[in-house]
Amino acid sequence: KNQVEQSPQSLIILEGKNCTLQCNYTVSPFSNLRWYKQDTGRGPVSLTIMTFSENTKSNGRYTATLDADTKQSSLHITASQLSDSASYICVVSDQTGANNLFFGTGTRLTVIP
Amino acid sequence: KAGVTQTPRYLIKTRGQQVTLSCSPISGHRSVSWYQQTPGQGLQFLFEYFSETQRNKGNFPGRFSGRQFSNSRSEMNVSTLELGDSALYLCASSLAATGELFFGEGSRLTVL
């Protein structure tokens, strides 16, 4: 069964600290993996998209890694800011003609001063 | 370039009523997909339209339907509303099937 699991469910960190969010998936055949940031009450915004051949991609203070062999991805946030408080959602796409997307339930990050 | 626009942003309905939500994609985007988001379930795929044709459908009852117009604008309809339909309904547009999704701000539906 195609699944995407994220951990932790929630996380509280101090402003300025780094953190890492995890995403494990069983989706096959794999096409790409996306990380989205969703502020409360807003729509998700894309942070990164990675294909099979990419193992690292950065977007400012956000760095995503992908290990296609172990089917794991992580999102590392450096020098966190209060504005990083949001839900982070991992989405995996398969290679079938239907281009199915499989969503994780997200990690809720709270950055406190 | 204008983003994805969803209307209305908030609405309250009672059980048994029906509701229609609207989504205007980014100009030039022909793919529009709809998602339901609830605190317990996360984002769940409803359906996707491309050039007025439904290409993919999620596992939702027939009360949930949608359509896409020739200008790529899309609507989704939920009939005979149930309390469990209370959720944030998100629309996303993309250039291609495997492309980046651009989400709207969502329509928050409350069913009383």
Image (cartoon, coloured by chain):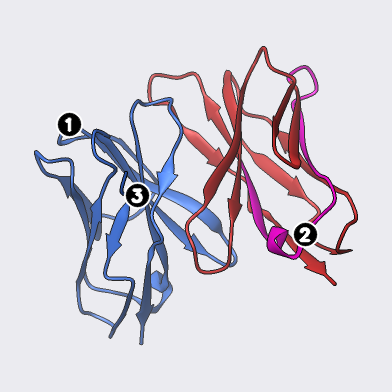
Chain colours: A red, B blue
Discs 3, 1 touching: Cβ within 8 Å:
no
Residue hosting label 2 = A81
Per the rendered image, the range of residues in magenta is: A68-90
Residue found at x 36% / y 53%: B60
Nearest the eye: B21 or B93: B93
Distance between the alpha carbons at the discs numbered 2 and 3: 25 Å
Residue found at x 44% / y 39%: B101
Q: What percent of the width, then of the height, locates residue A31?
A: 55, 20
Q: What percent of the width, then of the height, locates residue A57?
A: 70, 27
Residue hosting label 3 = B3
What amino acid type should be assigned to the residue bearing mark 1?
Ser
Residue found at x 80% / y 23%: A70
Q: Is residue A3 above or below residue B103?
A: above
What amino acid type should be assigned to the residue bearing mark 2?
Gln
Question: For residue A80: magenta?
Answer: yes
Residue B6 falls in image quadrant: bottom left
Quadrant position of the C terminus of chain B in the picture = bottom left
Quadrant position of the N terminus of chain B in the picture = top left
Residue found at x 41% / y 74%: B86
Question: What is the chain letter for disc 1?
Answer: B
SS under mark 3:
loop
SS under mark 2:
loop
Distance between the alpha carbons at the discs numbered 3 and 1: 19 Å
Image position of B44 (left or right of B40): left
